[in-house]
Amino acid sequence: MDVLSDVVAVTRTGRPRSAYVRWHAPWGQEFSSVPGSAGFQVVLQGACWLLPVDAEPVRLGTGDVVFLPHGRGHILADSPESPVTTPACDPDDPELYDAYATDSVDRSGDGGPVTVLLCGAYQLDPSRAHPLLLSLPDLIHLPAHPGRRAELDSAVKLLAAELENPSLGTDAAIPALLDTLLLYILRIWFDERPLREDHATGWAAALNDPPVAAALHAIHRDLAAPWTVAKLAAEAGLSRAPFAKRFARLVGQPPLAYLTWWRMTTAARLLRTSDAPLRTVAAQVGYTSEFAFAHTFKRTHGTPPGTYRRKG
């Protein structure tokens, strides 16, 4: 798997939630701050305003996509002056919405202009949060424009259709479409990050740097391989010392430190989601010695792998 695919597969937990909602102005909806979650908003019809807690209002038009990777609270409204008219939406509250909901009832407003929204939330495991996600800003806004990648719009249309007209297989289709939408949002955002300075750092810079990106993809493609700095440098097409320095500068940690962290993060997921023997889990993340694996796992997570599994 590549880096983005792994990030979504390993850090997401629980069942994602999504809803298709129609509003008539005037209206205002609050979305609670939920640490350990990520949410998105897509304007399918009309326009509205996104009002962050500690930032300037953002006007959204038809086709605009907003991603909030850190679960920060916000308000959506037809106007910055419109009051909040309904209870706060909290994706952790099972009483508020079904996992996949369609709401076409005018819960506020008096017949004014229509705004149709597609919203969703992902639960993330803070203990396994990938630095790629941690490096994202509080708000990612992808405005609609003719040059925007068509696959994002296609994913939005498919998800909206499943929510508006659920049918056989909807319960299987929606989680896959939500993951696809998340991947497209992240792909577009990272691809569009300009490297304005030669010393730019961070995951946007790392994924846009061919040598470092090649090494990262090699790690995620074959985690069990006996990687060394020299072998990763060969994947990057650089000599050992320049590669190690470049990787550490962009990613924020040396190559083998990142390799070990990702191995232990993946091992934690395997221990929680499978009943594979410890030796099998160890082999899957690149350890031929079960003892060495257990030692590294305890150093990383503070508990032996067997205890970690029993505690869930």
Image (cartoon, rainbow, N blue to C red):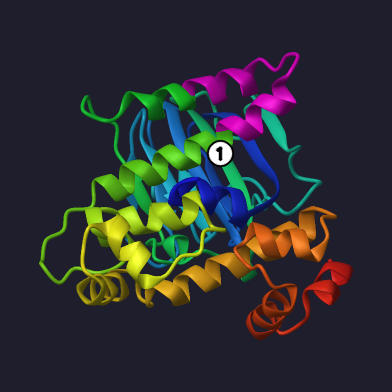
Q: Is residue 181 above or below residue 233?
A: above
Magenta segment range? 157-177
Is 43 displayed left or right of 148 in the figure? right
Name the residue nearer the viewer: 70 or 259: 259
Q: Position of residue 301 (x, y in %)?
A: 68, 79
Circle count: 1
Q: Please give the name of the residue rendered at 54% of the width and 72% of the height, measured from the top-left corner.
A: 261
Location of residue 103 (image quadrant): top right
Q: Is residue 201 magenta?
A: no
The residue tagged 1 is: 179
Name the residue nearer the viewer: 60 or 206: 206
Q: Residue furthest right?
A: 310
Is 224 displayed left or right of 231 in the figure? right
Q: Please give the name of the residue rendered at 84% of the width and 73% of the height, measured from the top-left corner.
A: 306
Q: Residues within 10 Å of mark 1 (few under 14, many from 20)?
A: some
Q: Is residue 97 above or below residue 93?
A: above
The kind of secondary structure element at disc 1 is: helix
Name the residue nearer the viewer: 201 or 276: 276
Q: Position of residue 177 (x, y in %)?
A: 57, 30
Residue 35 visible in the current orientation: no
Q: Position of residue 109 (x, y in %)?
A: 55, 32
Q: Position of residue 123 (x, y in %)?
A: 65, 54
Amino acid carrying label 1: it is Asp
Q: Is residue 42 above or below residue 131?
A: above
Location of residue 302 (image quadrant): bottom right
Name the residue nearer the viewer: 140 or 312: 312
Q: Please give the name of the residue rendered at 44% of the width and 74% of the height, measured from the top-left corner.
A: 256
Residue 210 visible in the current orientation: yes
